[in-house]
């Protein structure tokens, strides 16, 4: 008998219980259900893989498409606060009610004989892709969840693949080094289709795979590039240039690399998805994405960033350093136990004066007390023997409230790590901080 639920939360709870493994790499089962659903996209598809920069790249692709007058659809994961954030149509997050019929359709398809078991990610991805396929889109923008070759999004043939920066993450699933991880990411490429590699120093495996299948390889530094000064930047591709552009609204030096890949993708798709120079300028100037070096003005200043691997932490550290002087930096941090935590703490440590380690609501998370122990070990071996205060909290909001209480008006609070950490602070909306002495 067909399972039916009245709310999205009930469907999501159901999805968590029907498959024995949380992550189950492979396309056999998800492709079989997609065939039963007759899942097809009648518009160009851009698929984005990589370790860092995927979400920013998708947001910039979407912003330029909107400014060009197109109707884009975006699938992204994970979400910060609400599941519905994973799907946007024409710039708007879809409603829970919009998703319900698609969850029903996936359930009906997978229960056909023989019944097929789907993981949470596979089930929810199919539901969102079915919604997008029926949304009369001009372009579908799909963010890869994990890896590329075996990710559920890869059941859809892409018209343009983008590979963002590649670093060590999810090594238990993707391989022990950048070369093996790069080969997994490259699996989203298709023969004869543009493959944009925006990583300035990509693993050789990515280049080799693109050449072996005959993809139209666009390499950063060869087929497209950028330069900039303190006021503006410019981009050049195979047949087009953009000069005197304002910096993207997403902050951080790494965003120019992401933006360069976005412009290369639109240049490669010019025949099917032309965009004007004005759409590019306006789109990049107006793009928004919560939790990516997001600076919330106030007293104290607040920075939110989902950096949760060594490469992303290095970018966050550089961006924090460029912000200038703050008397005290308060850091709220929570992360998964399978991350390479020691080098992350070592990198950002010199900028932090007070740590607020927090537990997270998932079994995969490192306990706050264990994060504190790892930091103590790092600090003990560091050359800079400063006094650094540490404390542990049961959740991100408790840690955040303690930081707000302790911070002076000229200080800085940085919330970073897992999506659960940043999402935990954003669950009631973006906090606006006013110095206590002004109240």
Image (tube, rainbow, N blue to C red):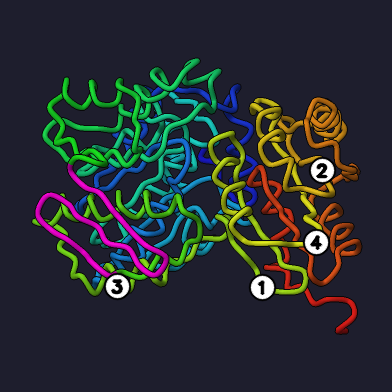
Please report whichever mark, 1 or 3, sits nearer to the chain's N-terminal start.
3
Residue depicted at 24% across the width and 32% down the height: 189
The spot of residue 90 in percent (x, y) is 36, 67
Q: Which residue has dot 2 on it?
A: 358
Whichever of labels 3 and 2 marks the residue nearer the N terminus, that label is: 3
Q: Are marks 1 and 3 in contact (CB under 8 Å)?
A: no
Q: Is residue 174 magenta?
A: no
- The quadrant holding residue 365 is top right
Position of residue 370 measured from the top left corner of the image (x, y, whole percent): 83, 29
Q: Are marks 4 and 3 in contact (CB under 8 Å)?
A: no
- Please tell me the numbered disc located at residue 297: 1
Image coords of residue 186 (percent x, y): 31, 28
- Give the Cα distance between marks 4 and 2: 23 Å
Q: Secondary structure at mark 1?
A: loop
- Image point 71% across, 48% down: which residue? 421
Marks 1, 3: nearer the viewer = 1
> What residue sits right under mark 4 in the picture?
327
Q: Which residues are magenta?
A: 223-244
Out of 408 and 309, give the one closest to the viewer.
408
**For marks 1 and 2 on the same chain, the one whose residue lies earlier in the sequence:** 1
Q: Is residue 336 visible?
A: yes
């Amino acid at each position: 008998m067909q399972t039916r639920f009245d709310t999205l939360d009930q469907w999501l709870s159901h999805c968590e219980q029907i498959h024995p493994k949380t992550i189950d790499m492979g396309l056999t089962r998800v492709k079989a259900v997609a065939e039963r659903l007759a899942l097809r996209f009648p518009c160009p598809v851009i698929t984005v893989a990589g370790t860092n920069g995927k979400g920013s790249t998708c947001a910039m692709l979407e912003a330029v498409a909107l400014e060009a007058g197109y109707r884009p659809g975006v699938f992204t994961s994970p979400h910060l606060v609400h599941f519905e954030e994973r799907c946007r149509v024409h710039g708007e997050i879809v409603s829970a009610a919009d998703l319900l019929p698609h969850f029903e359709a996936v359930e009906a398809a997978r229960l056909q004989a023989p019944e097929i078991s789907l993981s949470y990610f596979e089930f929810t991805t199919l539901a969102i892709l079915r919604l997008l396929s029926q949304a009369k889109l001009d372009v579908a923008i799909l963010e890869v969840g994990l890896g590329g070759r075996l990710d559920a999004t890869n059941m859809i043939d892409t018209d343009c693949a983008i590979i963002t920066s590649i670093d060590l993450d999810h090594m238990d699933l993707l391989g022990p080094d950048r070369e093996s991880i790069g080969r997994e990411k490259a699996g989203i490429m298709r023969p004869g289709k543009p493959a944009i590699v925006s990583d300035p120093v990509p693993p050789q495996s990515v280049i080799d795979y693109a050449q072996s299948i005959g993809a139209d390889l666009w390499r950063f530094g060869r087929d497209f590039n950028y330069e900039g000064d303190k006021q503006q930047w410019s981009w050049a591709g195979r047949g087009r240039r953009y000069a005197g552009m304002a910096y993207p609204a997403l902050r951080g030096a790494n965003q120019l690399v992401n933006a360069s890949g976005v412009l290369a993708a639109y240049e490669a798709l010019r025949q099917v998805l032309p965009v004007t120079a004005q759409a590019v300028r306006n789109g990049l100037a107006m793009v928004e994405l919560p939790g990516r070096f997001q600076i919330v003005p106030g007293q104290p200043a607040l920075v939110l960033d989902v950096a949760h691997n060594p490469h992303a932490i290095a970018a966050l550290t550089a961006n924090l350093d460029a912000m200038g002087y703050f008397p005290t930096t308060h850091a709220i941090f929570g992360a998964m136990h399978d991350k390479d935590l020691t080098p992350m703490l070592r990198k950002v440590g010199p900028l932090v004066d007070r740590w607020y380690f927090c537990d997270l609501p998932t079994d995969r998370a490192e306990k706050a007390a264990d994060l504190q122990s790892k930091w103590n070990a790092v600090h003990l071996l560091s050359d800079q023997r400063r006094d650094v205060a540490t404390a542990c909290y049961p959740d991100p909001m408790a840690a955040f409230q303690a930081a707000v209480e302790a911070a002076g008006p000229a200080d800085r609070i940085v919330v970073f790590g897992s999506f659960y950490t940043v999402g935990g602070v954003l669950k009631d909306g973006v906090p606006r901080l006013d110095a206590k002495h002004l109240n």
